[in-house]
Image: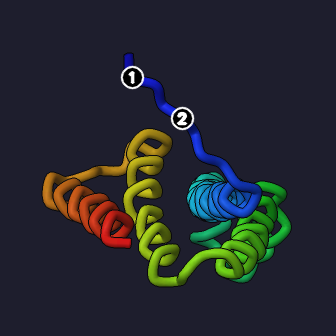
Amino acid sequence: MLRIVRISSPERDSFMEANMRATLLLVAVLALTVYGQLAIKARALAHSADGAATVDKFVYLKAMLSDPGVLSGLAAAILAAIAWIVALERLEIGFAYPFVALSFVFVPLGAKFLFAEPLPPLQILGMALIVIGVTMSALAR
């Protein structure tokens, strides 16, 4: 009968917990970044549909900068920056930074499903290469 014995130490557990928190911060950076981009795009579409964008760019920008959806997207960007700063305190930038590239996968996917934007095969290939590259980078560490 095979028994698996877990060898634990307070230092090892603390290290694993800190790495898990840092990884969750990377997920937060990515989620907040994607949300911010998609929220601002949604509101840009809404404001351009009401004709403000075609009449006067100043009116359009004023409407955008006072829109709660746009402000939530900008707030998400600020929160993402804060999470990034804290994550970098715990992770090597060479490990963490490639994960930011996943926004180039999730934003177009979100735009496809939320706004019916096209996703041509060549772009899908590029997105797959990004995922492969990020995976290889993470496994190399």
Q: Is residue 117 left or right of residue 80?
A: left
Residue at 60 percent across and 76 percent down: it is: 91
* Residue 22 visible from this viewpoint: yes
Q: Is residue 64 left or right of residue 27?
A: right
Look at label 1 and name its amino acid. Leu
Image quarter of residue 44: bottom right
**Residue type, label 2:** Val
Residue beneath the point at 32% across and 61% down = 135
Is label 1 in a helix, a strand or a loop? loop
In this rendering, position of residue 89 left or right of residue 100? right
- SS of the residue under disc 2: loop
Q: Examine the rendered structure and indicate whether residue 57 appears above or below residue 69.
A: below
Residue 98: which quarter of the image? bottom left
Is 91 in front, or is 61?
Answer: 91
Whole-angstrom CA distance, mark 1 to mark 2, is: 10 Å
Q: Look at mark 2 in the image and give the residue it sits on.
A: 5
The residue furthest front is 1
Nearer-the-camera pick, 88 or 19? 19
* Viewer-proximal residue among 49 and 7: 7
Is 94 placed left or right of 41 in the picture? Answer: left
- In percent of width and height, residue 140 lies at 31, 71
**Where is mark 1, residue-wise?**
2
| Location of the N terminus (image quadrant) | top left
